[in-house]
Image (cartoon, grey):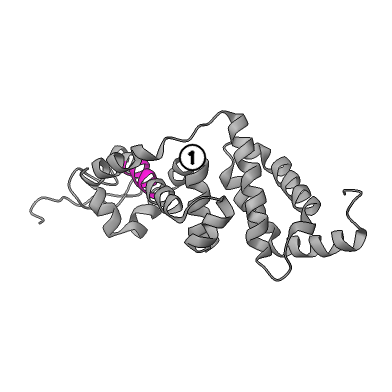
């Protein structure tokens, strides 16, 4: 505990942190390139937030304020890991090319059935996203922040948040589509092929539409 922080203030701060501790830690684990650093990064973020608690304005969004500090710590840790983000201007061409690939429309048509057959590939694909793409997807899809709130947390324009979201989601679809084609979950024709359990006889498709 910092010497400049009174016991009463620290107690008040930790009571607030405990409300969101699980989601804060989950966010750190999922945002870091090296999840083994999660405990150290989380503790560093909480300490930084405590030391700067006097700058927090009571009545405003404490959860979003802490997310901003946590995200900054994750960015620093990921920079030290040596993973650089791809430039934003490469996003559009990649997404257009992806949308033209066979099987892509099938993934979007029935994503629930498709994802059920992917397993750990989802985790591996997510870990290959940039820090910004991961952060935007987690804050939007998991923690349910608005675009404006995400922009404030990540200190970037709303348009940039939307670009990271769009590019990150497209990358996930591309990674999973490549896996699906290799595993036979999706064929070159635009329809999902159910995965059969080992030893289960497969019905012939002869004569089907």
Question: Which residue is pictured at 70% across the width and 71% down the height?
Answer: 59
Q: Nearer the viewer, residue 202 or 68?
A: 68
Residue 11 screen position, x and y as percent: 86, 62
The C terminus sits in image quarter: bottom left
Q: Nearer the viewer, residue 93 or 122?
A: 93
Query: What secondary structure prevails in the magenta region?
Result: helix
The quadrant in which residue 18 appears is: bottom right
Magenta stretch: give its range.
Answer: 169-177
Q: Secondary structure at mark 1?
A: loop
Q: Is residue 77 above or below residue 173?
A: above
Question: Which residue is pictured at 29% across the width and 52% down the height?
Answer: 107
Q: Residues within 10 Å of mark 1 (few under 14, many from 20)?
A: many
Q: Is residue 192 in view from this perspective?
A: no
Q: Is residue 84 above or below residue 153?
A: above
Residue 96 screen position, x and y as percent: 25, 44
Name the side, left or right, on which 80 lies relative to 1: left
Kindly give the residue lying farthest to the top in the view shown. Answer: 82
Kindly give the residue lying farthest to the left in the view shown. Answer: 207
Within the magenta stretch, is there residue 171? yes
Q: Nearer the viewer, residue 76 or 160?
A: 160
Within the magenta stretch, is there residue 91? no
Name the side, left or right, on which 32 lies relative to 170: right
Please tell me how many numbered marks the rendered image carries: 1
Residue 100 screen position, x and y as percent: 20, 44
Residue 127 screen position, x and y as percent: 50, 40
Q: Is residue 41 above or below residue 24?
A: above
- Kindly identify which residue carries mark 1: 130
């Amino acid at each position: 505990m910092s010497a400049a922080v009174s016991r009463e203030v620290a107690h008040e701060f930790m009571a607030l942190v405990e409300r969101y501790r699980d989601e804060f830690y989950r966010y750190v684990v999922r945002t870091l390139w090296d999840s083994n650093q999660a405990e150290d990064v989380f503790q560093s973020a909480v300490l930084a937030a405590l030391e700067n608690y006097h700058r927090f304005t009571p009545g405003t969004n404490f959860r979003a304020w802490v997310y901003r500090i946590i995200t900054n710590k994750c960015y620093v840790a990921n920079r030290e890991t040596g993973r650089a983000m791809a430039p934003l201007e490469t996003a559009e061409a990649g997404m257009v090319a992806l949308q033209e690939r066979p099987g892509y429309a099938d993934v979007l048509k029935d994503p629930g059935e498709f994802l059920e057959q992917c397993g750990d590939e989802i985790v591996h694909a997510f870990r290959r996203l940039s820090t910004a793409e991961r952060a935007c997807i987690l804050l939007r899809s998991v923690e349910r922040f608005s675009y404006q709130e995400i922009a404030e947390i990540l200190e970037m324009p709303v348009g940039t948040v939307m670009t990271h979201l769009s590019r990150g989601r497209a990358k996930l679809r591309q990674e999973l589509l490549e896996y699906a084609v290799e595993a036979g979950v999706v064929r070159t024709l635009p329809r999902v092929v159910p995965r059969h359990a080992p030893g289960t006889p497969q019905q012939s498709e002869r004569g089907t539409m």
